[in-house]
Amino acid sequence: MHIQFAELPVFDQDRAKAFYTGHFACQVTADQPMGDSGRRWIELTFPGAVTNLHFVKRADDTAGAEPVLVLVDGDVEATVAALKARGVEIITEPQEAPWQPGRTVAEFRDSEGNRMVVASK
């Protein structure tokens, strides 16, 4: 998978960290307190990619309506099948992107309810 740097709004930082390390084999590159607020700076790296994913704590557990991250993957169907087998909510099954013929896309929700897109290269 390939992304650059993304800030991801989450309500439960531990739950989000477990989701991405468990489902995408991300490695934790930073997990440290941010002052006295109880918030932490958590940064994850996707395997085999120059990528950083930083969790930004949001005030409540209400997720946004629009996708917040696009993951580019070589095998969208296999990734979606693996997520589904682990109980991840799939919003749209793999299908051709209406805006780009020949590109496969699918959507899922992460542990925090964020809409995510998995797209072929």
Image: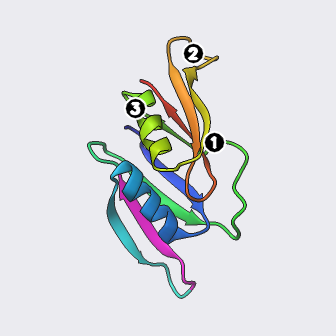
Disc with the residue nearer the chain's start (3 vs 1)? 1
Q: Residues within 10 Å of mark 1 (few under 14, many from 20)?
A: some
Which stretch appears magenta?
37-45
Residue ID at (44%, 25%): 120
Name the disc covering residue 67, or none.
1
Which is closer to the viewer, label 3 or label 2? 3
Instruction: Answer whether labels 3 and 1 touch (C-beta < 8 Å).
Output: no
- Vertical comparison of 44 with 96: above or below: below
Q: Position of residue 21 (x, y in %)?
A: 37, 58
> At 33% across and 52% down in the image, what residue appears?
25
Label at residue 78: 3
Disc 1 on helix, strand or loop?
loop
Asked if the magenta segment contains residue 7, the reply would be no
Above/below status of 118 relative to 99:
below
Q: CA distance from mark 1 to mark 2?
A: 17 Å
Which numbered disc, 3 or 1, marks the residue closer to the eye? 3
Q: Are marks 3 and 2 in contact (CB under 8 Å)?
A: no
Badge 1 amino acid = Pro
73 up-or-down from 23: above or below: above
Q: Amino acid at mark 2?
A: Gln
Residue found 59% across the figure and 62% down from its top: 10
Q: Which residue lies most toward the top here?
A: 101
Mark 1 or mark 2: name the one nearer the start of the chain.
Answer: 1
Q: Classify mark 2: residues with Cα within 10 Å, few (<14), some (14-19) or many (20+).
A: few
Quadrant that contains the N terminus: top left
Amino acid found under the numbered disc labelled 3: Ala
User: Horizontal and vertical percent for residue 80?
Assistant: 47, 36
Q: Indicate the colouring scheme.
A: rainbow
- SS at mark 3 in the image: helix
| Magenta region includes residue 40 | yes
Report the disc number at residue 100.
Answer: 2
